[in-house]
Image (spheres, grey):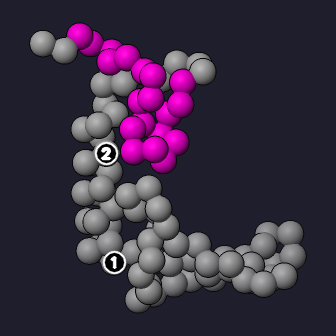
Amino acid sequence: MSESRITHWIDGKPWGGVAERSGKVYDPATGRVAGQVDFATEAEVDQAVAAASAAWRGWRTCRWRPGRTCCSGSGNCCTGARPIWPRS
């Protein structure tokens, strides 16, 4: 089995950079190395927080209901949903 790379998920997609540091991920059943996980720098954490904050403004007033598409990657995380509170 080949080793997999586990990277950051920023702004709805896998991060494409090269990590300065990484660590081994072990398969607990075998004890063998199963992959590598990227460790984030402070700048990468800041990038992830900024993307999450921007996304939050778009979906913070949406109420999830069964049968609704939520965060499907379409750019609109509230397709067919209604705001929790009426907008003024």
> Residue at the location (42% across, 36% down)?
77
Q: Earlier in the sequence, mark 1 or mark 2?
A: 1
Kind of residue at badge 2: Ala
**Residue 38 versus residue 62: which sits nearer the camera?**
62
Q: On residue 49, which mark appears?
A: none
Q: Which residues are magenta?
A: 68-86
**Residue 49 versus residue 83: which sits nearer the camera?**
83
Between label 1 and label 2, give the one nearer the viewer: 2
Residue 22 position (above or below residue 7): below
In the picture, measured across the screen, residue 44 lies left or right of residue 15, that is left
What is the quadrant of the N terminus in the image? bottom right
When asked about the image quadrant of residue 62, the answer is top left
Classify mark 1: helix, strand or loop.
loop
Instruction: Estimate the spatial distance between the alpha carbons at disc 1 and disc 2, rounded to whole Å.
Output: 21 Å
Prevailing SS of the magenta stretch: loop
Kind of residue at badge 1: Thr
Residue 4 position (above or below residue 53): below
Question: Whole-percent x and y of residue 55?
Answer: 31, 45
Asked if the magenta segment contains residue 35, the reply would be no
Classify mark 2: helix, strand or loop.
helix
What is the quadrant of the C terminus in the image? top left
In the picture, measured across the screen, residue 77 lies left or right of residue 23, that is left
Total numbered labels: 2
Asked if the magenta segment contains residue 79, the reply would be yes
Judge the density around disc 1: few (<14), some (14-19), many (≥20) Cα neighbours within 10 Å: few
When asked about the image quadrant of residue 56, the answer is top left
> Residue at the location (37% across, 17% down)?
82
Q: Which residue is mark 1?
A: 41
Judge the density around disc 2: few (<14), some (14-19), many (≥20) Cα neighbours within 10 Å: some
Q: Which residue is mark 2?
A: 55
Residue 33 position (above or below residue 15): below
